[in-house]
Image: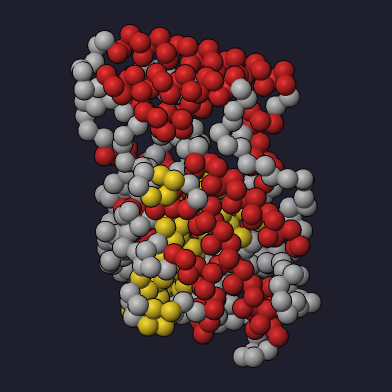
Amino acid sequence: MTATNHRKSGRWGRRKLLQALGLGAACAPFIPLLDARGETDPAPRRLILVYTPHGTLHKFWNPTGTETDFVLPELLAPLAPYQHDNLIVLKGMRLNGQGGAGPHTRGMPLLFTGSEQLPGDKYKHGGAPPDDPLGWGGNVNASIDQVIAQGLAGTTPLHSLHLGYQVGGVHVANRMSFTAPDTPTELYENPQHAYDQLFGLAALDKEAYERLKAKRISSMDVVRAELEGLRFKVGSDERPKIESHLAALDDIETALVNGYQCEVPPLGEPIDHVANESSAEVLSRHIQLIAAALRCDLTRVVTLQVARGEWDANTYPWIPAPMTDFHHAHTHNAPEGSEAEAYLRGIRRYYAEKIRELADALAAVPEGDGTMLDNTMIVWGTEVGHGQTHQFTEMPFVVVGGKTFLNSGRFVTHQDVAHHRLLVGILHAMGQTSIDNYGENDVDVGSGPLPGLLL
């Protein structure tokens, strides 16, 4: 269950209070700080879905040991700080999905929608002539992030946040998130554009800033007057919360007058956000934005897409053992012990380092008796199990964070279990407990959440 479903009727949480006053939308900028001062509800749960391409190298990815006493291998070693209480490594998962396209193209929409591709020729490989028989249709589901975001509609100012690096055009083969069947989600590749959307007040000139600040302070005056009137209408047990809200409003107004923003992270100088050599910096900036957006409660649902499976032309020139060809090409020919294999190992470890960077950013934010990471579920997946075999078995999934509601600190080996069960588990973790089957598939994939995932 999500925090919104934990509230008991008759109690005045700050959102219920603002909604009762008809001021929820007007006061959205103030909600994060009201959280900090006036709220006693449980910390909200959050979801971050992360995609990286081309599967993994299982020899260097699979842990050794038992379910609770295991050793992380080379490609997951960066996640060691979270191994014992905030990490789940899943082995033995499979994707079930058919379609006319190649495995990368089938795997992308299947990963988080759980739906097979429809037959047809709506989409073609790049440069294919109109009469080329190799084509495919769309998928038939929204992705789970959008189902969860819809369930949280009205809780935060932003429905969801979607960031990416070198993802290509809006196409079923190039997206991990879908707002509706056959409708890929738009995302921000340029961190500066995302920054402007999230923290537009900081990007305004002085005159525009002052106008918006005055508007927000005016809205606060209305809230303050209503709270003052409400203070004498509620029961004595609720009065301290009203007074705490009033004190929080004073803090917010002082912060606004002094130019405070919700901890807007400095992004640094503009960069070429699509260049191969910019990968690490682009992702670091995206991670800063994700942490800030969650900390400010602008959204609770995020996706981060690193490149794409089909037509991925990234070269990662700064990875040890740099190669002259692009990432996708090397996955097709990387014999054991070769420079190409060393290059791929470097890339996959780099991905884990970025997941660690994201986890660290959330772990640095205190929340309740723990940190924001404890209440945030980071799910890392890919579109194929292995870049050369293109298999849909032995799919590598990793879950970081969420230890307040997940059975963490484990390396779990499943016996060819459909990843649909993981999708249902994520849905349940984020409050969608009425959904026991998700996705469209001709094969029986089982029902209910992945066994042992949830506390």
Q: Is residue 326 left or right of residue 161?
A: right
Q: Is residue 248 above or below residue 82?
A: above
Q: How many discs mark residues in the rendered view?
A: 0
Question: For residue 387, which quarter of the picture?
Answer: bottom right
Of residues 30 and 311, the one nearer the viewer is 30
Of residues 324 and 245, the one nearer the viewer is 245
Q: Position of residue 189 (x, y in %)?
A: 67, 50
Of residues 109 and 261, the one nearer the viewer is 261
Q: Kindly identify the residue that appears in the image at 64 percent across and 91 percent down.
A: 337
Q: Is residue 451 above or below residue 238?
A: below
> Can residue 131 be seen from the camera position used here?
no
> Can residue 326 be seen from the camera position used here?
yes
Q: Is residue 411 above or below residue 82?
A: below
Question: For residue 389, which quarter of the picture?
Answer: bottom right
Q: Kindly identify the residue that appears in the image at 52 percent across and 19 percent down.
A: 253
Q: Position of residue 140 (x, y in %)?
A: 45, 55
Q: Is residue 329 left or right of residue 229?
A: right
Q: Is residue 444 left or right of residue 279?
A: left
Q: Position of residue 319 (x, y in %)?
A: 71, 72
Q: Kindly identify the residue that appears in the image at 35 percent across and 32 percent down.
A: 39
Of residues 104 and 333, the one nearer the viewer is 333
Q: Kindly identify the residue that appears in the image at 69 percent across and 47 percent down.
A: 190
Q: Position of residue 70 (x, y in %)?
A: 39, 78
Q: Is residue 191 above or below residue 322?
A: above
**Quadrant in which the C terminus appears:** bottom left
Looking at the picture, the colour scheme in use is: secondary structure
